[in-house]
Amino acid sequence: MNFFAQELIQKSDVSDIFDQVLQGKTVGLNDCVRLLKSNNTYALGIIGNILREKLFGKIATYVNNIILNYTNVCITYCKFCAFYRAPGDSEGYTLSVDDVVKRVVTARDQFGISQVLMQGGHNPELKLDYYEQAFRTIKDKCPDVAIHGLSASEIDTISKVERSSTREVLSRLKESGLDSLPGAGAEILDDDVKSRISPLKIKSQEWLNIMRQAHELGIKSSATMMYGTGEDYEQRARHLIKIAELQEKTHGFMSFIPWSLEPNNTKMQEDGMIKYPSGGLELLRMIAISRIVFSGLIDHLQSSWLTNGIGMAQLALTYGADDFGGTLIGEEVVSATGARSTELSADKIIAAIKQIGFDAHERNNFYETIRVH
């Protein structure tokens, strides 16, 4: 660390928190709020980078995968979503199990994917056997492809359709081939925020309970935060601390992914709730703060290229992120906002990682290196 960086850290308004974290101590709610309020983005990034380098050196990972959005039919009508269509809408669709499996097989054969991220709307017409058949057939035809599928809110919808418990749904899905759970559906884990942006979706404690149940059943997961929805710093801080507290109990979160709301074409933009996305500087702050808050708790932090672009994802690797995320073919949720193209090949990710002096490692579903480039 050069003299200028040391001076910047020592003079920071949160230097005492930096000292605590570098000594291996955890961050509480009040300190988390202070980090979020700090304007010293560069100092936050220096600490985030130090903590990342301690764990991973100059290695940055990515996963070769597809996102498979199996249905856009949804009954939660989230105000931040441009993807969903109400039941009966002429633009609504649901893929058959055969079509789901064909897409995975094709992606495996053409692109060599090792993971499918399967997510969709909250479709009340889909019963548990739809997912069980899809997962079993994927595993039968592509045993080397991991299934990273279904948000906590989708699990909740399935349990309501089946009139069963979420634990039973999770158990049956695991038996059918589900490998891990994505962190979607969290948004901001504060019910005041949820009542404003997604009033029909599961509440904060329900999301946490489903994640806890998954972890207890041996299903690892990621955790996410969708920031920039009009929440305040304390609400963001409570979100981070709730995830940290659950991780201390279950150790089931493999990664954390902060990403910014893209309001284009959404009800939130239409109603004037949010006009513009948060921007790249806020991404760097959230990456650094997440690395600091989750130090010693959650090792892997994704750079969120999908909503912020490749250039900002490269910078995020120097602010505390260690994972570039995944290749994307056929993604439809973020692309529905019209924000940017969401196609990205492995070659482009590898080049982006190497451009900033990192070593590119392809990983599997569980963040284990399977190929070094």
Image (cartoon, rainbow, N blue to C red):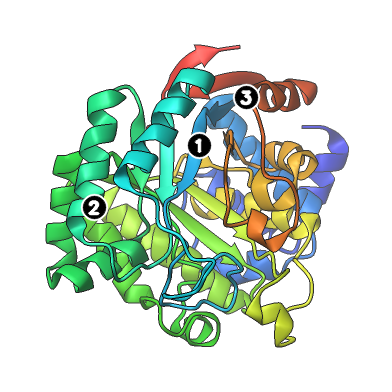
Q: Residues within 10 Å of mark 2 (few under 14, many from 20)?
A: few
Q: Residues within 10 Å of mark 1 (few under 14, many from 20)?
A: many
Nearest-to-viewer mark from 3 and 1: 1
Residue identified by numbered label 3: 346
The amino acid sitting under disc 2 is Tyr
274 over 102 or under it: above or below: below
Q: Is residue 275 left or right of residue 160?
A: right
Separation of residues labelled 3 and 1 (CA atoms): 11 Å
Residue identified by numbered label 1: 66
Nearer the N terminus, badge 3 or badge 2? Answer: 2
All told, the count of numbered labels is 3
Q: Residues within 10 Å of mark 3 (few under 14, many from 20)?
A: some
Q: Quadrant of the C terminus?
A: top right
Residue 216 visible in rendering: no
Q: Quadrant of the N terminus?
A: top right
Residue identified by numbered label 2: 130
Q: Disc 1 vs disc 2: Cβ atoms closer than 8 Å?
A: no
340 over 350 or under it: above or below: below
**Along the line of sight, which residue is nearer the eye, 149 or 289?**
149
- Name the element at disc 1: strand
Q: Disc 3 vs disc 2: Cβ atoms closer than 8 Å?
A: no
Task: Name the outermost residue toward the right.
Answer: 4
- Name the element at disc 3: helix
The amino acid sitting under disc 1 is Ile
Separation of residues labelled 1 and 2 (CA atoms): 20 Å
> Picture quarter containing residue 335?
bottom right
The amino acid sitting under disc 3 is Ala
